[in-house]
Image: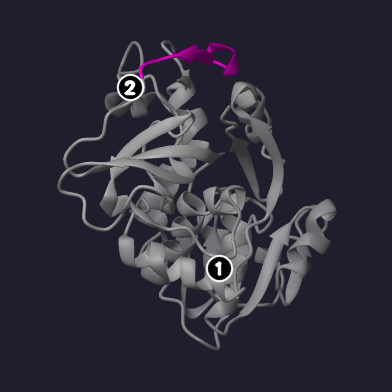
Amino acid sequence: MKAILFTEYGSPDVLQYKDVEKPVPGDNEVLIKVYAASANPLDWHSMRGAPFLARVEFGLQKPRDPRLGADVAGRVEAVGKNVTQFQIGDEVFGDIFKGSFAEYACTSEKLLAAKPANSSYEAAAAVPVAALTALQGLRDKGQIRSGQKVLINGASGGVGTFAVQIAKSYGTEVTGVCSTRNLELVRSIGADHVIDYTKEDFTNNDQRYDLIFDTIGNLSVSGCQRALSPNGICSIAGFTTMFHLFQVMLFGGKKVGMMETAKVDKKDLLFIKELLETGKVVPVIDRTYKLNETAEAIRYLETSRARGKVVITVEHK
């Protein structure tokens, strides 16, 4: 089969489109015939081995695991002897951690759910990592509740577009922060208010928010504290520099802090599936690329200009 591999750290030029052995599922695993995957910042962080501290996990000199790709949507091709939840032919989606940029991939049945009935493979593949990050950041760290005023920083990105819609599903008043060219997009997915960050700094106006969800990690701690209501919380899903991370850790206190790394939770995946099937959440897809164009997909994702998700489609002869 064909797969995307990388044997050294670097730019998207290190990605190789290669022939490899088709994987065989373990006793508790499912073999998926991949029809679509999607790219996430984790992919280019893994590819570049950055930040450098991440190489403790990825491999110091070269990657321990040469595969890329977490989000997946496809059809069950084979099952291990202990698998009980899926059968050959089932349409599934989920997060496999590593290896979805390939024609076939194996993963535990615990990391998969039935594909939403109204979603294409491309739409389903756009969901897992970004939507789980949005849900867990808003709910677990952010303690979202109906009636709150919620602000999403980076509302037009992969996590942000899901966060806007998930926050609305909780019955909140949502403000989305994005660039000028994305204002209409953020309105179209349900934001009650939009702020163009190129023209206005929301941390310096008089509005206060019960929950700020920062999907980018570029806000100052003092700015967030200023924009929060007395009992407000700022949940941060990422960081732009190590300096920003240390600033949050040292000065964020109880009000401003990093969310825990999103977990692939079966219940949460099924919760999001229900939101998709009821139409409360609709994945936003900016561009699609073929598997052999994965390097270009990652290159585009690294520009930080993607509106929603970047999806990789896999064709089978």
Above or below 233: residue 110: above
Left-right relation of 121 to 269? right
Give, as a single range, the part of the protein colored magenta.
9-21
Label 1 sits on residue: 276
Counting residues from the N terminus, which is met first, the one under dot 2 or under dot 1? 2
Q: Quick check: can you spot residue 88?
A: yes
In this rendered view, identify the residue nearer to me: 191 or 246.
Answer: 191
Q: Does the magenta portion include 15?
A: yes
* Front position among marks 2 and 1: 1
In this rendered view, identify the residue nearer to me: 298 or 250.
Answer: 298
* Residue 59 found in image quarter: top left
Element on which disc 2 rests: loop
Give the percent coordinates (x, y) of residue 17: 53, 15
Residue at image location 68% in from the left, 71% down from the top: 175
Instruction: Identify which amino acid the numbered label 2 is placed on.
Output: Asp
- Tell me the crowding category of disc 2: few under 14, some 14 to 19, or many 20 or more residues within 10 angstroms, Cα based: some
Residue at image location 36% in from the left, 68% down from the top: 140
Q: Which mark is residue 65?
A: 2
Quadrant housing the C terminus: top right
- Marks 2/1: CA distance? 32 Å
Give the percent coordinates (x, y) of residue 98: 37, 33
Instruction: Identify which amino acid the numbered label 1 is placed on.
Output: Leu
